[in-house]
Image: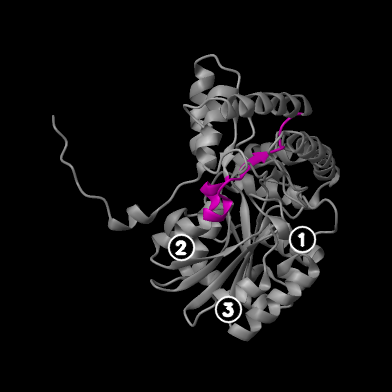
Amino acid sequence: MQIASFPLARTMARLGTESAFVTLAKAKALEAQGRHIIHLEIGEPDFDTPQHVKEAAIAALRNNRTHYTPAQGIPELRDAVADFVNRTRGTDVRRENVLVSPGGKTMIALTLMALLDPDDEIIIPDPAYPAYRSIATYVGARPVSVPLLEERGFRLDVAMLEAAITPKTKLLVINSPHNPTGGILTEDDIASIARIVRRHDMLVISDEIYNRHSYDAPFASYYGLSGMPERSILIDGFSKAWAMTGWRLAFGVMPVAIAEAVGALLLNTVSCTATFSQDAAIAALQGPDEPVRAMRDEFLRRRRILVDGLNAIPGVTCQLPGGAFYVFPNFSAIERDDIKLADYILEQGNVAVLGGSTFGPNGRGFIRMSYANSEANLREALDRIRKTVALYQHAPTVA
């Protein structure tokens, strides 16, 4: 029987994707052919979820914590999040400011949907996590890029930020520590950005999901240090710090009026977040911190392995990232078309990496690599990349 073809909504043409999962699918297909692929493309800690967190979820299941909850999250978790944020950011938020969602993308998407009208402008660093731009364009808003420059350590330039502001600017997105570059904002950066935000009457979404992965200086929270919770929205969660990517758990902290709007969208889209997962999240926030610190210390050691190894490859330069678990080396002296080069490294070198321009035009010539992998795999990946790049440079059919 022939199935009728129906046109999709025009908005679907504006919806982007996330290249990490596209590349992951390609790499998995090669693995199915018997190839040994080293995965540096996906932003996922290679550690197990801490045991006390898993035990809390198991206990919740045994106690039949498997039914609907309030869309905003269970009160106990919202209180635990408020306490955690107040302790770590020096703020004074309450349960009413907190929402829980199945994953950070959900919180980002619904927050943007609640705030942006068609033709509103949203300032997004470039390069940046793709979900910001994708959802903004989906709702008809206009993303405005502010380049993050390698020579500034990929920190937001406040002069460029102010130059990008127009009467239509409604939102600014900040992500520190930053995906994909690993750049971090300093306290001085935050103070300067906050002055601009006050002057132009803007809202800020501060994505601080990598806050436990700051290496060379204490984490500087825009949400905590700006002194403007009334015009700031915090995005955070459990995926990165507690190695809980598959649990799909995040939270947002925002002014009550915005929280009520985002809560209505949660109710109308996902209904609620799994109850037993929320019980596990409480255990993560209130339990021992040693597993989180151990993961951070291991990432710190791996960071140096990857940075030193990349800088030893002729034609490649790599800054030492201040946070997250990514490096963003510059391959432009070898090939400006980073997507083409990333595909070649996967196909010929059996290492999955991401072209920098998939995070925005200013990422052209760069490649993102995650050091959330074992030391042995990182060293093997460096050896493969070095050989593959040399092959690429001497292959006239591809170079």
Q: Residue 91, can we see it? A: no
Q: Is 319 placed above or below 235 here?
A: above
Query: What's the magenta region?
Result: 356-374
Where does the image place residue 23, in percent across and percent down from the top left? 52, 35
The mark total stands at 3
Q: Nearer the viewer, mark 3 or mark 1?
A: 3
**On the rendered structure, is 3 left or right of 375?**
left
Q: Nearer the viewer, residue 266 or 40?
A: 40
Residue depicted at x 54% and y 41%: 338
Where does the image place residue 74, in percent across and percent down from the top left? 62, 57
Residue type at the position of mark 1: Phe
- Mark 1 = which residue? 84
Contact, CB < 8 Å: mark 1 with mark 2?
no
Residue type at the position of mark 2: Ala
Residue depicted at x 51% and y 40%: 339
**Number of other residues with Cα within 10 Å of mark 1, as a class: few under 14, some 14 to 19, many 20 or more:** some
Q: Is 176 placed above or below 367 here?
A: below
- Mark 3 = which residue? 202
Mark 1: which secondary structure? helix
Residue type at the position of mark 3: Met
Upstream in sequence: badge 3 or badge 2: 2
What distance separates the C-alpha of mark 3 from that of mark 1? 26 Å
Mark 3: which secondary structure? loop
Q: Residue 25, can we see it? A: yes
**Number of other residues with Cα within 10 Å of mark 2, as a class: few under 14, some 14 to 19, many 20 or more:** many
- Mark 2 = which residue? 136
Please tell me whether residue 372 belongs to the stretch shown in magenta: yes
What distance separates the C-alpha of mark 1 from that of mark 2? 29 Å
**On the rendered structure, is 323 left or right of 275?**
right
Residue 102 image label = none
**On the rendered structure, is 276 left or right of 290?**
left
